[in-house]
Image (cartoon, rainbow, N blue to C red):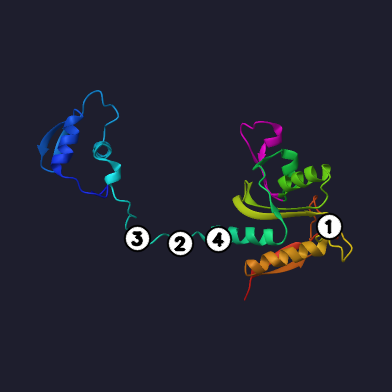
Amino acid sequence: AGLLGVSLADAEVRRVLEALGFALREAEAGWDVTVPTRRVDVSREVDLIEEVARHCGFDRIPATFPALTVPPPPVDPRILRTRQLRTLARGQGFSEAVTFGFTSAPAAEAFVTGETVVPIKNPLSEAFAVLRPSLLPGLVESAGRNIRRGQRDVQLFEIGNRFTLQSGETQAIAFIWTGAGRALHWSERSRDTDFFDAASLVSVVADALDASVLLQPLSALPSFLVAGQAAEVVASAKE
């Protein structure tokens, strides 16, 4: 009854098993069952219960929801945060991209500062030789593929893991935005996206995470950024 959810008479259980060639001998806690040598699929008590259930009829087992003896565990806050950021990014007009966790060594080195990339021991090819230290190589490649096919206005985001030897595996969100800074409309002229659009997006993400952000000039400019069009984002919890 504990597994099937329905009680069966001992006589019914004995009838089914003996008809199938099983030998039953009375024991202190039920029966000792000898399994026919041809039934190599029966090795556990639960296998015998299944045999009885199949021959008595699964339709006789009532459809009931099992009793909850412990409360369900709370949802991991990281999952809730990821869902929140995904909804926010889509609301800002971005489409989600899912890029490879592997990339080429030159692409990885261009987007890593002060840390060491993680090599793949047996890479499929040089294009997948290391684990990505940033989400940006995949997004840049995706944007370039769109632009080469005539799609100039690209708004992509990705939430995923990045890897370095020093920091291990960490989760991040990244955006890429090219072309028009806002949707085309007959009432106004179009303009290209700029630094202030990116700063506004950072502010929106920070508000969603209940954080305060400060944009500061970079003391050492990474090779993949442009002087005068980049800043360091310093985040802190709101007071």
Callout 4–callout 1 Cβ contact below 8 Å: no
- Residue 88, how many percent across, how many down? 66, 62
Assign the C terminus to one quadrant of the image: bottom right
Callout 3–callout 4 Cβ contact below 8 Å: no
Looking at the picture, tell me which residue is in the foreground, 237 or 113.
Answer: 237
Lower sequence index among marks 3 and 1: 3
Left/right placement of residue 10 relative to residue 131 reads left
Local secondary structure at mark 4: helix
Lower sequence index among marks 3 and 4: 3
- Res 34 seen here: no
Gap between marks 2 and 1 measured at Cα: 42 Å
x 14%, y 38%: residue: 31
Gap between marks 3 and 2 measured at Cα: 12 Å
Callout 3–callout 1 Cβ contact below 8 Å: no
Callout 3–callout 2 Cβ contact below 8 Å: no
Which kind of residue does numbered mark 3 sit on?
A: Val
Which marked residue is nearer to the observer: mark 2 or mark 1? 1
The quarter of the displayed image where residue 89 is located: bottom right
The quarter of the displayed image where residue 44 is located: top left
Residue with the mark numbered 3: 70
- The question of residue 195 being in magenta is answered with no
Which kind of residue does numbered mark 1 sit on?
A: Ala
- Residue 15, how many percent across, how many down? 16, 35
Residue with the mark numbered 1: 180
Local secondary structure at mark 2: loop
In the image, farthest residue toward the bottom: 239
Local secondary structure at mark 3: loop
Which kind of residue does numbered mark 2 sit on?
A: Pro
Left/right placement of residue 22 relative to residue 81 reads left
- Residue 164, how many percent across, how many down? 64, 47
Query: Which dot marks residue 74?
Result: 2
Residue with the mark numbered 4: 80
